[in-house]
Amino acid sequence: MMTKLIAPSILAADFANLQRDIEMVNQSEADWFHIDIMDGVFVPNISFGMPVLQAINKHAGKVIDVHLMIVDPDRYITTFADLGADILTVHYEACTHLHRTLQAIKAAGMRAGVAVNPHTNISLLEDVINDIDLVCIMSVNPGFGGQSFIPNTYKKIKQLKELILDNNADTQIEIDGGVNSDNAKKLIDAGADVLVAGSFVFKSSNPTDTIKNLKEIANS
Ligand code: DX5
Ligand code: ZN
């Protein structure tokens, strides 16, 4: 069985001590850096943009997983490649020509991800599943950290896992929003490969131990 991965979401880090928090992730058992880019249009919040990602990339020693919560993501694909993104995830709901967008992400040298909002049915991915390296199932409505996990996510993971197997696709399943040590195991058992965790990691008294603990639970 493939190792299950933990991706701390930098949105919950202390931006006044960003280098310290990045180093913590570097030294921890985390696998990826999850980077949330919000434009205030696709989601009702603005997080941070290119200069901050550039600064993160200077210190981050692990895979950089960029989650774009922006309209018209095609405009910025090469920019994010230049900024060091290894995985670029766009929202299903923000792409009119998703198939083309996925090809453009790959042509720019990155792995291509698609995020789906809680209301978006997994079956809508059927015709592009073989073009997707990673599906990010949103387990909260995107826009903010620290929200409560939506239980319908378990059903969506199972549907997606079935779709992947039926199509012999090589697609990872990532879960984003409200992940903690109480739901981690159940998410993995449903079929998840990557768990994103923001508040649960960074608001804990010992983020390094929290990451270690999540990683253990995910691989138990
Ligand atoms: C929400 C973001 C998430 C967020 C997760 O829109 O996509 O990545 O940072 O944060 P928690 O783990 O606090 O729900
Ligand atoms: Zn995210």
Image: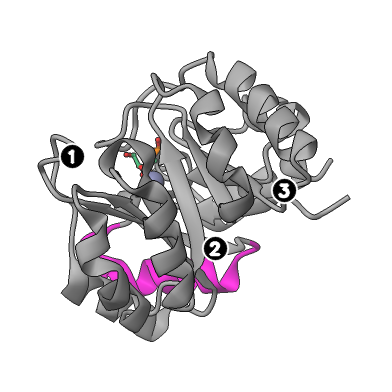
Q: Position of residue 45 (x, y in %)?
A: 14, 40
**Mark 1 → mark 2, Cα distance in angstroms:** 24 Å
**Mark 2 → mark 3, Cα distance in angstroms:** 22 Å
Q: Point out the frontmost of discs 2 and 3.
A: 3
- Side of 120 relative to 184 (left or right): left
According to the image, label 3 marks what residue? 169
Question: Is residue 90 visible to the viewer in this orientation of the structure?
Answer: yes
Dots 2, 3 in contact, CB < 8 A: no
Going from N to C along the chain, the mark reached first, 1 or 3, is: 1
Residue stretch in magenta: 14-29
Question: Quadrant location of residue 56?
Answer: bottom left
- Nearest the viewer among 202 and 77 is 77
Locate the C terminus by quadrant: top right
According to the image, label 2 marks what residue? 32
The residue lying at 54 percent from left, 63 percent from top is: 32
- Side of 195 relative to 120 (left or right): right
Going from N to C along the chain, the mark reached first, 1 or 2, is: 2
According to the image, label 1 marks what residue? 42
